[in-house]
Image (spheres, rainbow, N blue to C red):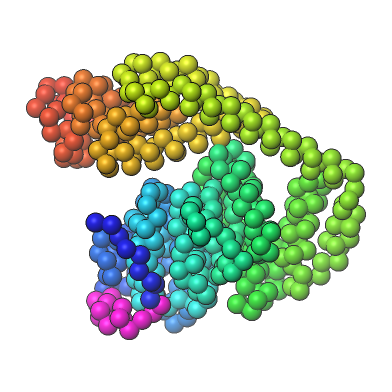
């Protein structure tokens, strides 16, 4: 049954009346420890991972960060960012249900954890933030609109706003936005376009580029995003000014800008000086920053640096577009007519995925390596999502094709080979199903219970080959 979006109820009598007693009877959640799963009383099918700072006490109100992983793995952002949450005194909450796919599923998960945490913990008003990676970033932006006035900032990683009419940024956006994107991320063009759109709308925002691909931002980048949110809260009166931290952050970022300048990275240095001016004016003396900006602005060297970077990104995107065109040409006929696994595999091998993966691994800082990773990872994510949706609607031909594409992009992924085995089994191609299961186990699949109980393999369970595969999991 499709989930219908419901409005978020800020600490309401409805929730308090139905859940407060049950929550009060539960054992207290221990601070300073990662809790993998807390069920939402408003909807027991929904749960979240949690980290409370070690100095947590219910006697004060706390800022909170809601996180959304594209694979419904709440533990991932909790493990990655618990030290940052500890350092700055935030409660960190991450849905175990929100995942890439229909946005309403993510919205339902966001509403459930919002309602549960607002009854369970003393949360500071107008100090809620949302973050997410990939499709999780789109859920975070959706939560920012639904909880307008309470979610004051969104940190979108590797992706931006929900797609579709009326879902993108607008002049009345109720939150500020901090985007992060890896230089090798296939969504890099989307994030640069979003940066320009937010600038045109005069929305307070940042888009930070880090050395990486399509992934959660490294903890130091996330820490910078939190610091930026803290600075903005100080500027608007959302929290008291902390002179010590303001000075520490200003000096660190000024040193970073000067290092970039000394290294000849003029475009990046100029950007950092501009951000310093915007972020710290009114909180710290920015006279020397303004002097640097005046010295840079309009110079021939800066114009040349900006032009070089623009041309570089155009070259990279041209390579990505050409590779996508070749993929569509090679696979297009099989989408229309179908094809045997061997025919499809031959078409995919002609595109040289192995060579592109090698290029991305061995030349990560060169244009061709960046283009290779953006292409391969983009194809992987798109194919995996398409396969998941096709499997749900029992379109096994489409699911098989997309999973074969995904397997070329990530040949070491046990999960992709396991999903391929399911598709073959559902299509009664038992020989291929067993071959893919064998490969999945070789690549590290070890969930014996999943394999024994998945109804997709009911026709294989009585075969000696299936029993042998189960023994392989039993005896590593």
Confirm whether the magenta stretch covers residue 20.
Answer: yes
The span picked out in magenta is: 10-24
What is the quadrant of residue 440 in the picture? top left
Closer to the camera in the image, 388 or 129: 388
Provide residue 74's location: percent of width, then percent of height.
39, 54
Residue at 64 percent of width and 58 percent of height: 198
Q: x%, y% of residue 81?
A: 50, 56
Residue 227, compared with residue 375, is above or below; it is: below
Q: Visible in this render: residue 131?
A: no
Quadrant of image for the C terminus: top left
Residue 467 drawn in magenta: no
In the rendered image of this protein, does residue 331 appear above or below residue 415? above
Residue in front for this viewpoint, 321 or 256: 321
Residue drawn at point x = 75 percent, y = 47 percent: 268
**Residue 129 as seen in the image, left or right of residue 119:** right
Closer to us: 175 or 56: 175
Which residue is drawn at the image coordinates 43% and 24% (left, top)?
331
Q: Is residue 104 left or right of residue 326?
A: left
Residue 288 image point, x, y percent: 86, 62
The residue at the point 25 percent across, 21 percent down is 432
Residue 115 drawn at (x, y percent): 36, 72
* 364 to the left or right of 308: left
From this viewpoint, is residue 256 visible?
yes
The chief SS type of the magenta part is helix
Rendered position, 57 above or below 311 = below
The picture quadrant where one finds residue 442 is top left
């Amino acid at each position: 049954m499709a989930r219908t979006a419901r409005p978020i109820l800020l600490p309401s009598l409805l929730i308090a009346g139905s859940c407060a007693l049950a929550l009060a009877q539960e054992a207290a959640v221990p601070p300073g420890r990662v809790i993998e799963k807390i069920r939402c009383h408003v909807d027991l099918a929904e749960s979240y991972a949690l980290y409370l700072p070690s100095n947590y006490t219910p006697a004060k109100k706390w800022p909170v960060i809601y996180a959304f992983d594209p694979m419904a793995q709440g533990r991932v952002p909790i493990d990655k960012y618990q030290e940052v949450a500890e350092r700055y005194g935030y409660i960190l909450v991450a849905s175990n249900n929100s995942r890439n796919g229909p946005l309403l599923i993510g919205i339902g998960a966001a509403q459930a954890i919002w309602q549960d945490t607002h009854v369970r913990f003393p949360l500071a008003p107008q100090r809620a933030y949302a973050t997410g990676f990939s499709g999780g970033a789109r859920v975070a932006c959706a939560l920012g609109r639904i909880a307008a006035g309470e979610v004051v900032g969104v940190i979108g990683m590797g992706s931006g706003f929900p797609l579709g009419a009326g879902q993108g940024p607008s002049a009345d956006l109720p939150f500020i936005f901090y985007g992060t994107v890896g230089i090798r991320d296939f969504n890099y063009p989307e994030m640069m376009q979003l940066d320009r759109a937010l600038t045109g709308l005069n929305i307070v925002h940042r888009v930070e580029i880090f050395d990486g691909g399509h992934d959660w931002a490294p903890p130091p980048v996330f820490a910078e995003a939190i610091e930026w949110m803290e600075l903005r809260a100080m500027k608007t009166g959302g929290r008291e000014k902390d002179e010590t931290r303001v000075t520490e952050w200003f000096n660190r970022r000024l040193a970073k800008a000067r290092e970039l300048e000394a290294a000849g990275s003029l475009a990046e240095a100029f950007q950092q000086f501009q951000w310093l001016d915007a972020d710290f004016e009114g909180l710290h003396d920015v006279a020397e920053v303004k002097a640097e900006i005046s010295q840079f602005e309009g110079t021939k060297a800066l114009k040349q640096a900006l032009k070089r970077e623009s041309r570089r990104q155009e070259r990279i995107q041209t390579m990505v577009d050409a590779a996508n065109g070749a993929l569509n040409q090679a696979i297009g006929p099989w989408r229309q007519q179908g094809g045997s696994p061997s025919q499809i595999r031959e078409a995919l091998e002609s595109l040289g995925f192995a060579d592109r993966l090698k290029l991305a691994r061995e030349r990560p800082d060169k244009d061709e390596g960046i283009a290779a990773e953006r292409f391969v990872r983009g194809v992987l994510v798109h194919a995996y999502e398409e396969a998941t949706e096709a499997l749900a609607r029992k379109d096994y031909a489409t699911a098989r094709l997309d999973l074969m594409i995904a397997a070329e992009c990530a040949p070491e992924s046990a999960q992709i080979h396991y999903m391929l085995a399911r598709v073959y089994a559902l299509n009664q191609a038992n020989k291929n199903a067993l071959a893919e299961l064998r490969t999945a186990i070789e690549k590290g699949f070890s969930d014996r219970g999943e394999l024994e109980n998945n109804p997709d393999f009911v026709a294989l369970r009585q075969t000696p080959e299936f029993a042998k595969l189960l023994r392989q999991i039993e005896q590593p």
